Image (tube, rainbow, N blue to C red):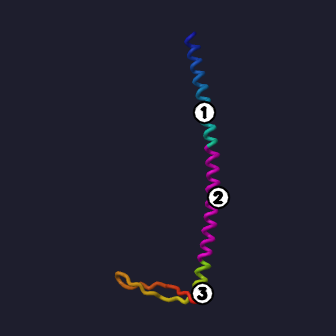
Amino acid sequence: MDTLKKSNFELNQNIEGWVERYEELTNERVALAEQLELMEVTHNEERLKLEATRAQQTKLIDFLQCKTESQAPKKKKVLPLKFGLMYIDTYTRTM
Protein backbone atom coordinates (compact mmCIF):
# COMPACT_ATOMS: atom_id res chain seq x y z
CA MET A 1 0.00 0.00 0.00
CA ASP A 2 2.87 2.34 0.78
CA THR A 3 4.38 1.89 -2.69
CA LEU A 4 1.04 2.73 -4.27
CA LYS A 5 0.80 5.97 -2.31
CA LYS A 6 4.37 6.84 -3.25
CA SER A 7 3.72 6.05 -6.92
CA ASN A 8 0.47 8.03 -6.87
CA PHE A 9 2.25 11.01 -5.28
CA GLU A 10 5.00 10.94 -7.94
CA LEU A 11 2.43 10.75 -10.74
CA ASN A 12 0.51 13.70 -9.28
CA GLN A 13 3.72 15.73 -9.10
CA ASN A 14 4.53 14.85 -12.72
CA ILE A 15 1.01 15.87 -13.78
CA GLU A 16 1.31 19.19 -11.93
CA GLY A 17 4.69 19.81 -13.57
CA TRP A 18 3.29 19.10 -17.02
CA VAL A 19 0.27 21.33 -16.37
CA GLU A 20 2.57 24.18 -15.34
CA ARG A 21 4.71 23.61 -18.43
CA TYR A 22 1.57 23.61 -20.61
CA GLU A 23 0.43 26.91 -19.11
CA GLU A 24 3.89 28.43 -19.65
CA LEU A 25 3.92 27.33 -23.28
CA THR A 26 0.37 28.62 -23.80
CA ASN A 27 1.33 32.02 -22.38
CA GLU A 28 4.46 32.10 -24.53
CA ARG A 29 2.42 31.23 -27.63
CA VAL A 30 -0.04 34.06 -26.89
CA ALA A 31 2.82 36.51 -26.42
CA LEU A 32 4.41 35.42 -29.69
CA ALA A 33 1.08 35.73 -31.52
CA GLU A 34 0.71 39.30 -30.21
CA GLN A 35 4.26 40.12 -31.25
CA LEU A 36 3.66 38.67 -34.72
CA GLU A 37 0.48 40.71 -35.11
CA LEU A 38 2.34 43.88 -34.13
CA MET A 39 5.10 43.08 -36.62
CA GLU A 40 2.53 42.50 -39.38
CA VAL A 41 0.85 45.84 -38.67
CA THR A 42 4.21 47.62 -38.66
CA HIS A 43 5.23 45.89 -41.89
CA ASN A 44 1.96 46.81 -43.61
CA GLU A 45 2.31 50.45 -42.54
CA GLU A 46 5.89 50.57 -43.81
CA ARG A 47 4.89 48.95 -47.09
CA LEU A 48 2.08 51.46 -47.54
CA LYS A 49 4.50 54.35 -46.93
CA LEU A 50 7.00 52.91 -49.42
CA GLU A 51 4.31 52.44 -52.07
CA ALA A 52 3.13 56.04 -51.58
CA THR A 53 6.72 57.30 -51.86
CA ARG A 54 7.27 55.25 -55.02
CA ALA A 55 4.07 56.62 -56.55
CA GLN A 56 5.11 60.20 -55.75
CA GLN A 57 8.56 59.65 -57.23
CA THR A 58 7.10 58.08 -60.36
CA LYS A 59 4.73 61.01 -60.76
CA LEU A 60 7.61 63.46 -60.34
CA ILE A 61 9.76 61.60 -62.87
CA ASP A 62 6.92 61.59 -65.39
CA PHE A 63 6.33 65.30 -64.82
CA LEU A 64 9.99 66.16 -65.25
CA GLN A 65 10.29 64.02 -68.36
CA CYS A 66 7.26 65.73 -69.92
CA LYS A 67 8.66 69.12 -69.00
CA THR A 68 12.05 68.26 -70.47
CA GLU A 69 10.51 66.87 -73.66
CA SER A 70 8.44 69.96 -74.21
CA GLN A 71 11.43 72.30 -73.76
CA ALA A 72 14.11 70.53 -75.75
CA PRO A 73 14.11 69.25 -79.31
CA LYS A 74 15.12 65.63 -79.74
CA LYS A 75 18.47 64.89 -81.29
CA LYS A 76 19.94 61.55 -82.15
CA LYS A 77 23.42 60.87 -80.96
CA VAL A 78 25.58 58.23 -82.56
CA LEU A 79 27.58 56.03 -80.27
CA PRO A 80 30.21 53.73 -81.76
CA LEU A 81 29.84 50.15 -80.64
CA LYS A 82 31.93 47.06 -81.12
CA PHE A 83 29.78 45.72 -83.97
CA GLY A 84 28.22 48.86 -85.43
CA LEU A 85 26.56 52.11 -84.50
CA MET A 86 23.82 52.72 -81.98
CA TYR A 87 21.46 55.66 -82.11
CA ILE A 88 20.05 56.99 -78.87
CA ASP A 89 17.68 59.83 -78.22
CA THR A 90 19.17 62.71 -76.29
CA TYR A 91 17.72 65.97 -75.17
CA THR A 92 19.43 69.32 -75.32
CA ARG A 93 18.21 72.01 -73.06
CA THR A 94 17.59 75.37 -74.69
CA MET A 95 17.15 78.52 -72.68
Left or right? Give the position of 86 relative to 75: left
Question: Compared to 27, does 75 lie above or below?
Answer: below
Displayed quadrant of residue 46 = bottom right
Callout 2 amino acid: Glu
Work out which quarter of the rendered image holds the C terminus and state it: bottom right
**Callout 1: helix, strand or loop?**
helix
Identify the magenta region: 32-61
- Point out residue 17 in the picture as x, y percentages from the top left corner: 59, 27
What residue is shown at x 62% (from left), y 67% (from top)? 53
The residue that disc 1 covers is: 22
Callout 1 amino acid: Tyr
Question: Compared to 78, does 28 lie above or below?
Answer: above
Callout 3 amino acid: Ser
- Point out residue 49 in the picture as x, y percentages from the top left corner: 64, 63
Mark 3 vs mark 1, CA separation in Å: 71 Å
The residue that disc 3 covers is: 70
Question: Compared to 36, does 5 lie above or below?
Answer: above
Work out which quarter of the rendered image holds the N terminus and state it: top right
